[in-house]
Image (tube, grey):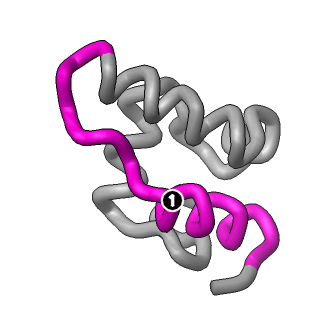
Amino acid sequence: MRLRELKGLGPKSEKQLAEIGIHTPEQLVEVGAIEAFQRLIQQAEDIGSNRPSLNFLYALVGALEDRH
């Protein structure tokens, strides 16, 4: 299964997660939603990009809980 197949995640989310080393649903489960979100924030700061919104965090939680 690909990350984009989880509820609430799509191709853009999958790409952003891959950029921080999360490529599979199993890796996302291992890291957890909060840690993944913190890594996304750190990456955004490192490259001078916009920080992810809280909606991304909610999507990560939903993906892990299999609900929208």
Q: Quadrant of the N terminus?
A: bottom right
Mark 1: which secondary structure?
A: helix
- Tell which residue pokes out farthest to the bottom in this image: 68
Residue located 57% across and 41% down the image = 37
- Who is closer to the viewer here, 29 or 38? 38
> Which region of the structure is painted magenta?
46-66
Q: How many numbered badges does the structure rendering display?
A: 1
Quadrant of residue 19 within the rendered picture:
top left
Q: Is residue 21 magenta?
A: no
Where in the figure is residue 11, as x and y percent of width and height?
Answer: 32, 62
- Crowding near the residue tagged with mark 1, few <14, some 14–19, many ≥20 C-alpha atoms within 10 Å: few
| Of 59 and 26, the residue lying toward us | 59
Q: Quadrant of the C terminus?
A: bottom right
Q: Is residue 57 magenta?
A: yes
**Residue type of the residue flagged with mark 1:** Leu
In the depicted view, which residue is nearer to us: 44 or 24? 44
Q: Residue at x 51, y 59 (%)?
A: 54
Residue sitting at 69 percent across and 72 percent down?
A: 62
* Residue 22 spot, x, y in % from top left: 55, 34
Residue denoted by label 1: 54
User: Compared with residue 64, is residue 18 higher up or lower down, i.e. above or below?
Assistant: above
30 displayed left or right of 8: right
Magenta stretch: dominant SS? Answer: helix
How far across and how far down the image is residue 30, in percent?
Answer: 81, 36
Relative vertical location of residue 13 with respect to residue 46 in this rendering, above or below: below
Residue at 75%, 62% in the rendered image: 64
